[in-house]
Amino acid sequence: MHPYRTHTCGALRADHVGAQVRLSGWVHRKRDHGQLLFLDLRDDDGLTQAVIDVSSPIFREVERIRVESVVCVTGQCVRRDPETVNSKLPTGEIEVRVEQFDVLSAAAQVPLQVNSDEDAGEEVRLRHRYLDLRRERMHRNIQLRSEVIFALREKMVEQGFREFQTPILTASSPEGARDYLVPSRLHPGKFYALPQAPQMFKQLLMVAGFDKYFQIAPCFRDEASRADRSPGEFYQLDFEMSFVTQDDVFDAIEPVLAGVFEQFGGGRTVDKPPFRRIPYDEAMLTYGSDKPDLRNPILLADVTEAFRGSGFGIFAKAVDKGSVVRAVPAPGAGGRARSFFDNFNTWAQRQGKAGLGYIIFADDGTPKGPIAKNLETERLDRIKQAAGLKAGDGVFFVCDKASEAAAFAGTVRTEVANALELIEPDCYRFCWVVDFPMYEFDEETGEIAFSHNPFSMPQGGMEALETQDPLTIKASQYDIVCNGVELSSGAIRNHLPEVMYKAFGIVGYSQQEVDDRFSGLINALKYGAPPHGGCAPGIDRMIMLLADEPNIREVIPFPMTQRAEDLMMGAPADVPEDRLKELHLKLSLPKKKAQPTEGAGQGGGNSGSGAPEAGKAGEPGKTGTGG
RNA sequence: GGGGGUGUAGCUCAGUAGGUUAGAGCGCUGGCCUGUCACGCCAGAGGUCGCGGGUUCGAGUCCCGUCACUCCCGCCA
């Protein structure tokens, strides 16, 4: 007999009755009746009940075992009496009579309860992640993650893609997020950067003639985290294709995404390819967002003209000064109490906005509310028409500069739909947002800047760059969005060096600077580069959607805290002086506020992390180069 | 960098208007219980109320500072 197990804990069924079996696993739960004891034994595969009674010489020993200990149980698989069958368990028709019992590893009292759905605090969960991951929900999430990634690989290969690896130690990429840096021992004062994405490498693979690339790519960014943004590192399904148009890219990835969501979406409705395509400008106007949630039926409307020169002075004046008015319909809210609308107004003010005007159309169509009193019937009709309103509806108004109005109307759209419970349940709604602007005006610097990826091909190519106002040029840039979550962005790339120089010239880079900063890529483009493009959907976010988790850390086995610390491993950590010396580094730490040093660490007990208290390690990253 | 929330037993939380001995459930320890499956019953141990300072006759509660976790803005595809 195998020293540990003949079966896994989810395997035994009625047809195993009579067999001599051996199971190993964790003691999930104990039910001690004094003369009779039940043990639920758990492993990756499932749960099996083991039973022993007082007549056994090892009864006392089994009785002493603590939950979460790892044990090996040997005995006969027996059928349960019909009245004691547990229909909730796949193994519920049988149980194992304990004849031999070996403790493989005893557990101390656990700091969080594995066998409970009760949520533990995030800090405890992260500090003892191996215990947290034993819990059913987390265990399922991580298993799902594995299956989704396998399916993605399978489907990408089916589409003719090949998987490649690209360097982790690489050069700092000039645009975008802050890099994580790795000091070089052999090159004093120089640093590698961890890739924010394998962007340039995948383009170089295209130049190298590999037609279709993909990678489950780790990406590193030293930026603040959010509920949907993992601190430090995350994964993308990174891919790139040669000799393609935007439509070819969409055609390639849509079946992969739709397929995975179909397969793992738990029966929720999934949009069929081709997904809707929404131009950026329309997205901002109609949804108030560049990542529209299509589950939300509310469509915004521009009603600026209805207020121009109207009796509602606040808006009329603002419009004269260049503001716009966006209408956010609240379908069916006409019957709601006045307080429903006023609460939105106070909510808006708490957000630092001027307020949120509204009109209520009663069931007989009578317009009510302070704004309605100041508008003539023609104006009201115009608003009704533009926003698609009917009797029994409400409508909110956002009045502000165009960009702010769009963004806030988008927020209101979400809030109103939530309040009215209008979000379509149990579905995945996909769309592409296309035609992003190539450039934007940077209010802070007063200069023109790339609005997204600088390596995208401007629509209209060289001619557009030479003849158009830069702020009107669109990029061949697109985002894929699911349920209002931005899964990724992608682009048809700029593969022409002259166009590249020109594009960078517009934001103030000289040819020399472009050569200096992107030498790898720009040189490669000079030796025959295929037109190419791709995209990189975020894998963690996909799994988050599939697992229906509100937080991305719930689908990552070992995430860091919001401040990018690993509480379990103690990273980032101080390093000994001689290691710094070897790397030619000298610390120049920020001044600490004078503060009596705290006593012993707050970890207390046997946290087991082994991390020395080490005071408050100064901000990492503020390292100055030596010599 | 800024704003919000949270921090009380190993875990999840309650703690009323500042008042004497800080509670509950789970877990833990001991006892009882032969068909439970969130087993049940009885008893017990366990608390620097995150930390530091202040106000007060008196602080878990009020004030200031600080730390940690978290949500949001900035930032970031």
Image (cartoon, grey):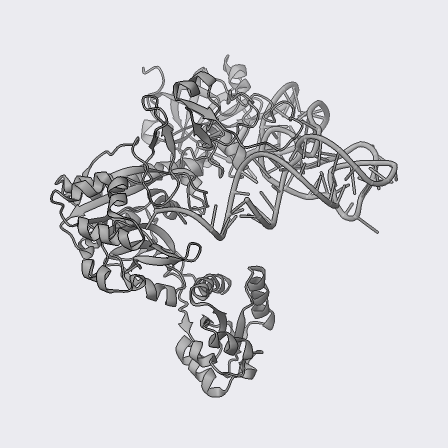
Residue A330, can we see it? no
Q: With A391 as the anchor, is B54 left or right in this view?
A: right
Residue found at x 18% / y 48%: A497
From the top left corner, tell me how far across and down residue A358 is, in percent.
53, 74
In this figure, what is the number of numbered marks? 0
State the image quarter where residue A444 is shown.
bottom left
Residue found at x 42% / y 41%: A230
**Quarter of the figure with the C terminus of chain A:** top left
**In this view, A324 is above or below A516:** below
Q: With A311 as the anchor, is A86 left or right in this view?
A: left
* Residue projecting furthest to the top: A57
**Quarter of the figure with the N terminus of chain A:** top left
From the top left corner, tell me how far across and down residue A285 is, in percent.
38, 67
From the top left corner, tell me how far across and down residue A569 is, in percent.
46, 26
Residue A610, can we see it? yes
Residue found at x 33% / y 65%: A281
For the residue pair A470 and A429, the one nearer the viewer reads as A470
**In this view, A62 is above or below A162:** above
From the top left corner, tell me how far across and down residue A540 is, in percent.
36, 42
**In this view, B21 is above or below B4:** above
Q: With A452 as the anchor, is A350 left or right in this view?
A: right
Residue found at x 38% / y 43%: A177
For the residue pair A409 and A69, the one nearer the viewer reads as A409
State the image quarter where residue A33 is shown.
top right
For the residue pair B65 and A410, the one nearer the viewer reads as B65
